[in-house]
Amino acid sequence: MAHNMPGDRFLPHPDAEWYDRRIGSSGGDLTYDELYAATPGQHRSYLRYVLAGHRGERAWAVRDLAEWKPQWLVPWNDAVTTFDDAALEHLWSVEGRDCWFAARGASDTAVDALADRIGAGPRPGRAEAGFFSGVHRMQLLVGADTDHALARLADLARADPTVARIAEEHGVWVPPHGPGVRRYVSQPWLIVADQDDPEPGLRIDPPIGEYLDDPRGVRCAWPLSVVLDVDLSLVGLGAPGERRHPFFGSLCEDCEADEEMADWRGWSAAGGRLVFDEEREDHCPGNEPDLGDWPLPARVGLAHDDRFEPDRVWRRSKRLGRVGGRPVFQQNPHWPGCCGRPMVFVGQTAQSVLGGFDQYLYGFACECGAGAQVGQHT
């Protein structure tokens, strides 16, 4: 087959029983519905087609496979770490910013070669050729997410501020000595309604008074709501029942729905309650929403995404968010820090769980008791 995309020459066709060369070369003309019904081997074959840079329509298959079927990335996870500048820049341009997940689970040998390449020679300036591909290699090293990759990442970051910034932006803390430290749980869980085994660590719409003495929004007189709260033991912070993280939302139809006014919240703990970092500055008297009889989700639990399973159940209408993993940002990534390191990512949900506008809420917590929330719109 002619190499007609920059990534093709770095992705040899494996001589394996599961591999479908037609799909790996051309995508096999699979429709959207056929792709969802594909076999494991077809999915793995299709990923070669995507990583070579053929798809060009934001397939999003890379992150999904890395999170829910990481074993299917083999052998592509090692191969993508060898991409040259042209192949990397083309892949990022056609498939989006989550391509770095393709390196998840890369072998120690591949990680060492990638880290050596990052650390070799002077780094091009932002306006020079090779700058962005250099950044993408750093992202791939973060995406490998193995203990060995974290050790190599930390060594590079302590010597190079650019690597340190990339690590922090992706939720890796680089201590003065030793390997990088994950500030996230690698394996995410879906938050799903109507489960036979609800998760007691999740609550929908708990009383706002459990968290705030003053329930008003920072810029609005209408009371805030807690869309969801999460027992932080689910992400490794403390014992069950020790501490919960709230996702704050507002049903005011004007001010709090504005991107300029509800894109960030930060708080500290004091006397058993939370205190927002920002001082109150009312811009809106509060406008009562007209939601009618809005049904709240019931029997909320945790589940794995089953899109790659042969007996899949279409759960999208029941999905309420995620716990763990890394944020699926809708806009520019922003990972808050506290106590000199990135905060722990708790999970994400949406204001629309309680009704109203569709703002995505990303929760972060620190061991010191502080918390933060990033709000983004599509």
Image (tube, helix red, strand yellow):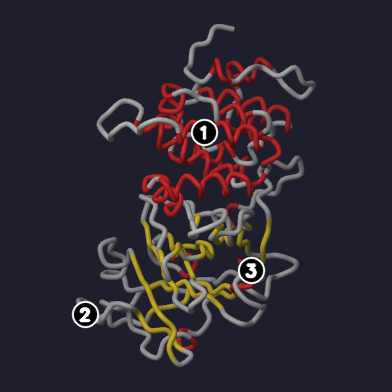
**CA distance separating discs 2 and 3:** 35 Å
Mark 3 highlights which residue? 234
Mark whose residue sits in front, 2 or 3 = 3
Does 351 sit left or right of 198 as displayed? left
> Label 1 is placed on what type of residue?
Asp
User: Which of disc 1 and disc 2 is earlier in sequence?
Assistant: 1
Query: Against 48, is 136 above or below?
Result: below
Q: Position of residue 80 (x, y in %)?
A: 56, 29
> Label 2 is placed on what type of residue?
Glu
> Label 3 is placed on what type of residue?
Leu
Which image quadrant for residue 127?
Answer: top left
For this orientation, the residue located farthest to the top is: 2
Q: Which mark is residue 108?
A: none
Query: Against 254, is 274 above or below?
Result: below
Q: Position of residue 211 (x, y in %)?
A: 46, 85
Circles 3 and 1: CB atoms closer than 8 Å: no
User: Which of disc 3 and disc 2 is earlier in sequence?
Assistant: 3
Q: Position of residue 138 (x, y in %)?
A: 46, 40
Mark 2 highlights which residue? 281
Mark 1 highlights which residue? 116
